[in-house]
């Protein structure tokens, strides 16, 4: 799309406040999850109580879900909504190299049930680790498969063999949240 032909009044109506409120609800939910993870990680320092690993991983997966939700506002799937996406990208200075645009984050979350089917349709050799939170570990030659993991020393969340750097994603969500609060 050519930015010179772009007309924000045509494509982004005066009721933009509803877009802002909607995106802010998403960014706030993501940042609440980040805060919850930070509390647990600082408090426990690797010694987790029963269920806390699952809580950390659930919150991190929620951040990915929220990131996918924000991504759809800026890069809509259907072409007829592209003007709105462009308008929001311009207003909030969201670059094309934003971590929110990474398609595998959206696809992994939006099609998680299908990814799970495919993952378990192939033979799995080695050790399956359902939940892991801690520093990255080498597997000593034995194939390791993490259903969900968070590598605290690398800031990487892994689900079904796909790794997602969380720090750039959280930074971008935080930046957007600050802008959305000012618009609010």
Image (cartoon, rainbow, N blue to C red):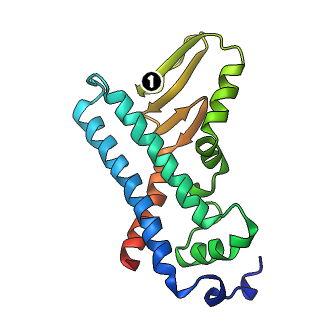
In the figure, is residue 172 to the left or right of 107?
A: left
In this rendering, does residue 169 appear at all?
yes
Q: Which residue is drawn at 62% across and 41% down?
A: 108
Most foreground residue, 150 or 49: 49
Mark 1 nearby-residue class (10 Å; few <14, some 14–19, many ≥20): some
Q: Position of residue 163 (x, y in %)?
A: 58, 36
Residue under label 1, please give it: 131
Q: Which residue is drawn at 68% across and 76% down?
A: 83
Is the residue 61 above or below the residue 82 in the image? above
Q: Position of residue 37 (x, y in %)?
A: 33, 41
Q: Position of residue 115 (x, y in %)?
A: 66, 33
> Within the image, what quadrant is residue 114 found in?
top right
Quadrant position of the C terminus in the picture: bottom left
In this rendering, does residue 152 appear at all?
no
> Within the image, what quadrant is residue 171 found in?
bottom left
Most foreground residue, 101 or 61: 61
Q: Where is residue 129 in the image (x, y as percent from the top left)?
A: 50, 18
Is the residue 79 above or below the residue 44 in the image? below
Regarding mark 1 in the picture, which secondary structure is present there? Answer: strand
Outermost residue to the left = 43
């Amino acid at each position: 799309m050519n930015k010179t032909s772009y007309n924000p009044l045509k494509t982004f109506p005066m009721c933009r406040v509803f877009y802002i409120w909607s995106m802010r609800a998403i960014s706030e939910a993501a940042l609440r999850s980040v805060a919850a993870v930070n509390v647990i990680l600082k408090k426990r320092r690797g010694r987790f109580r029963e269920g806390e690993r699952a809580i950390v991983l659930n919150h991190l997966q929620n951040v990915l879900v929220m990131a996918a939700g924000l991504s759809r506002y800026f890069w809509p799937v259907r072409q007829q909504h592209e003007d709105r996406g462009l308008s929001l990208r311009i207003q909030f200075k969201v670059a094309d190299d934003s971590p929110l645009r990474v398609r595998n984050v959206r696809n992994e979350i939006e099609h998680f049930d299908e990814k799970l089917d495919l993952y378990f349709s192939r033979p799995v050799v080695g050790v399956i680790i359902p939940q892991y939170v801690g520093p990255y570990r080498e597997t000593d030659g034995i194939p390791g498969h993490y259903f969900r993991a968070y590598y605290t020393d690398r800031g990487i969340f892994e689900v079904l063999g796909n790794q997602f750097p969380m720090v750039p994603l959280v930074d971008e969500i935080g930046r957007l949240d600050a802008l959305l609060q000012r618009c609010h």
